[in-house]
Amino acid sequence: RAGHFATDPPPLVPWGVPSSPSFGPVAMRSPRVALLVLSLLTYQSFGDERPDADDPDIEEESLSAEQLRRLHQLFDANGDGKVSLPEVMDFAHKVGKSIAGKDIGALLEEIDTSKDGKLSLDEHLNDIHNQADGGDDEEMKELEQRKKVEVAKFQAADVNGDGVLDESELPALFYPETHEGVLSVTVSETMRQKDANGDGVLTPHEFWEAGGEGDDAELSEEETADFAKLDTNNDGVLNMEELQAWESGRFHTQEALRKLFEISDKDSDMHITADEFAEAREHISASDAQYHLIEWAEHHEL
């Protein structure tokens, strides 16, 4: 299950893998990536230095130079021998949809109780209810709110309006980042949950849910920096469109790829050649972009 939204059930991930948009989607779909995430997370959690390119454990999980060259070829949409950040972001968006569609068969088999090859709203809501069965009053209250959101997501995903989701519609329900309508529902619910004063936008403290100690609660440098990057119109708050960049995972992917370009783009021309990509292999292996690259390589069986 990809895309960690406030309305989605807790995904099944390997123990220790962080459930945040930056790590979760790729870790959940690839055990190899999950292990790499856990390896790097250990350093972050205990304040140790990040593993460098010579770390033998990281080297074992590295993609080969040939795999990087083949990925580069997939990125290079216009075939000019070099790739730009927009080209790689476009590739990431398209392959995300492809991976979502690939995963749906197993999900449908598990929750399609009528075995008609489609998911009805009742089947979806029953599955959600069964996951939360036995909760206390507060949990059951939250469950009812979540069901309302799931109904809205289901309706947004039901493109032909026939009341069921077929295999072409189903990915949107479980991977909201692949469908604008479903993503809009999840972003609206996140805004509702975080917007303490109900003004339709999020302050830094509301966004990071640091309001328990009031506006004096101190945010980390990383939290402050991430918020500033999300706040594209520089008005000090996040609107729905700006929040969507976070909820979709697009922000995290773009940040990881920006660093990838910093590592690989030796001549600073805002493009990466296949040679630059391959030569940066060891440094790439210790970067956040490695999670995405491994997932893409596995998906394309490189």
Image: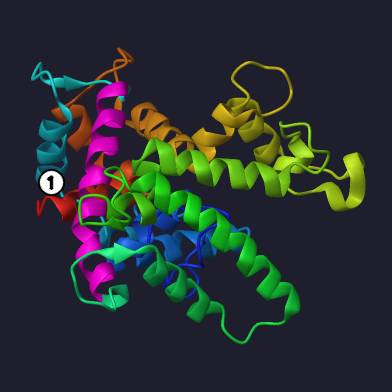
Where does the N terminus fall, quadrant-wise? bottom left
Identify the amino acid type marked 1.
Gln
Is 134 on the left or on the right of 11, as rendered?
Answer: right
User: Which residue is at a point 37% across and 57% down the rendered structure image?
Assistant: 174
Q: Position of residue 250 (x, y in %)?
A: 43, 36
Q: Classify 155 as above or below 58.
A: above
How packed mark 1 is, by other alpha carbons closer than 10 Å (few <14, some 14-19, many 20 or more), is some
Is 158 on the left or on the right of 241, as rendered?
Answer: left
Q: Name the residue under label 1.
A: 67
State the residue in front, 128 or 54. Answer: 128
Q: Which colour scheme is used?
A: rainbow
State the residue in front, 229 or 161. Answer: 161
State the residue in front, 44 or 180. Answer: 180
Q: Classify 80 as above or below 178.
A: above
Q: Position of residue 253 (x, y in %)?
A: 40, 39
User: Which residue is at a point 76% across and 33% down the rendered structure image?
Assistant: 203
State the residue in front, 285 or 130. Answer: 130
Tell me if I can see residue 102 in this picture. yes
Q: Which element carries disc 1, helix, strand or loop?
A: helix
Q: Position of residue 171 (x, y in %)?
A: 29, 53
First to last magenta residue range: 86-109
Is 47 on the left or on the right of 176, as rendered?
Answer: right
Q: Classify 156 as above or below 6.
A: above
User: Which residue is at a point 41% across and 49% down the rendered structure image?
Assistant: 155
Q: Does the magenta stretch include residue 98?
A: yes
Q: Is residue 289 magenta?
A: no
Tell me if I can see residue 288 in this picture. no
Q: What type of secondary structure mainly makes up the magenta span?
A: helix
Q: Position of residue 55 (x, y in %)?
A: 36, 58
Q: Which residue lies furthest to the bottom in this view?
A: 134
User: Which residue is at a point 75% across and 41% down the rendered structure image?
Assistant: 195
